[in-house]
Image: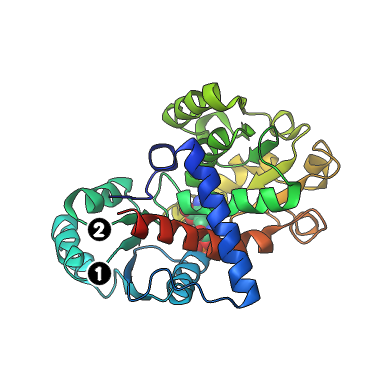
Amino acid sequence: MKHFIDFHEDVGIDELNYLLDIASDMKAKTKAGIEHHYLNGKTLAMIFTKSSTRTRVSFEVGMYQLGGHSLFLSNNDIQIGRGETIHDTAKVLSGMVDGIMIRTFKHSDVTDLAKYGTIPVINGLTDDQHPTQMLADLLTIKEHKGTLKGLKLAYVGDGNNVANSLLQACSKAGMDIAIGSPKDYTCPDKYVKQAQEDAAVTGSKILMTDDPFEAASDADVIYTDTWTSMGQEDEKAKRVQIFRNYQVNTKLMGVAHKDAIFLHCLPAYRGYEVTEDVIDGPASVVFDEAENRLHAHKAILVNCYLNS
Ligand code: CP
Ligand code: NVA
């Protein structure tokens, strides 16, 4: 079964290039209006226990453009929300649909769906990881910079699900990655070790620091994300204080390469993790990045469905 749950475990180094090529091909076909119904008649159940704009729309539109059909299942409406187990949900959905995409809190709920079901499972974000975002991000960087290998990406801010997945993805792609986060809010060792494992093969360099300027120095890509992820709303006031020196602003962009690009998975909170002049300025490619979710997710769907 071909799942897309964990970028480190589920994406091979060569497979990454293959996925990026499929995503570019999907994009070209979409733009040219060329039909690409690779998933004719296939169905995708999309379970959401957290909010979403990009992930929901891109998977739903992606399935349609591939000739398939998707079902949006909010936990407010399905029986998971009333206590039905992941085990039973996995068994039931496996009998009716061809794949599951899930966005939820506990990462183990996603791995359990894969364990108990018999169809591909795609991780649309957990508290720990956001792997589908990564393929869109790498595609965007490749489009703007022409290559991935040897570039430096600096992530400044909260060592959250996006940062963990960036460690996994950049090290696979042969990109140098620097994480600049406060000491108590940096990525868990597990993700640093995984990145070091892949870096030993691909030649990428990993830097973990609590100095945002050291992280951003000479970077080709500056990346940030919200200081308050879904589920952490009660900590917002505290987090605004903790992260106030980790804002991406023109001063921070000033230590990156002159032609550095700015990425953000979105949604963004202007005036907090990024200033308006950066996110709405010439270095920002955040809306290309958002559009690329569509093309990247179609590549993930095709790879999972046709190789399972
Ligand atoms: N970046 C991202 O996953 O956006 P959504 O929360 O809108 O899906
Ligand atoms: N870190 C953010 C990403 C949103 C796409 C969150 O988990 O809320």
Q: Position of residue 229 (x, y in %)?
A: 49, 52
Q: Position of residue 277 (x, y in %)?
A: 80, 57
User: Is the residue at mark 2 in contact range of ligand 1, meaning its CB lies under 8 Å from it?
Assistant: no
Which mark is drawn over residue 97? 1
Residue at x 29% of width, y 72% of height: 76
* Label 1 CA crowd tier, 10 Å (few <14, some 14–19, many 20+): some
Which mark is drawn over residue 119? 2
Q: Is residue 138 left or right of residue 247?
A: left
Q: Position of residue 302 (x, y in %)?
A: 42, 60
The image quarter containing residue 254 is top right
Query: What amino acid is labelled 2 in the image?
Result: Ile
Label 2: element kind: loop
The image quarter containing residue 242 is top right
Which quadrant holds the C terminus?
A: bottom left
Position of residue 111 relative to residue 170, above or below, is below
Label 1: element kind: loop
Pointer 2 or 1: first along the chain: 1
Q: Is residue 183 left or right of residue 221?
A: left
The one nearer the camera, 275 or 13, is 13
Residue at x 52% of width, y 53% of height: 133
Position of residue 170 relative to residue 183, above or below, is below
**C-alpha gap between disc 2 and disc 1:** 8 Å
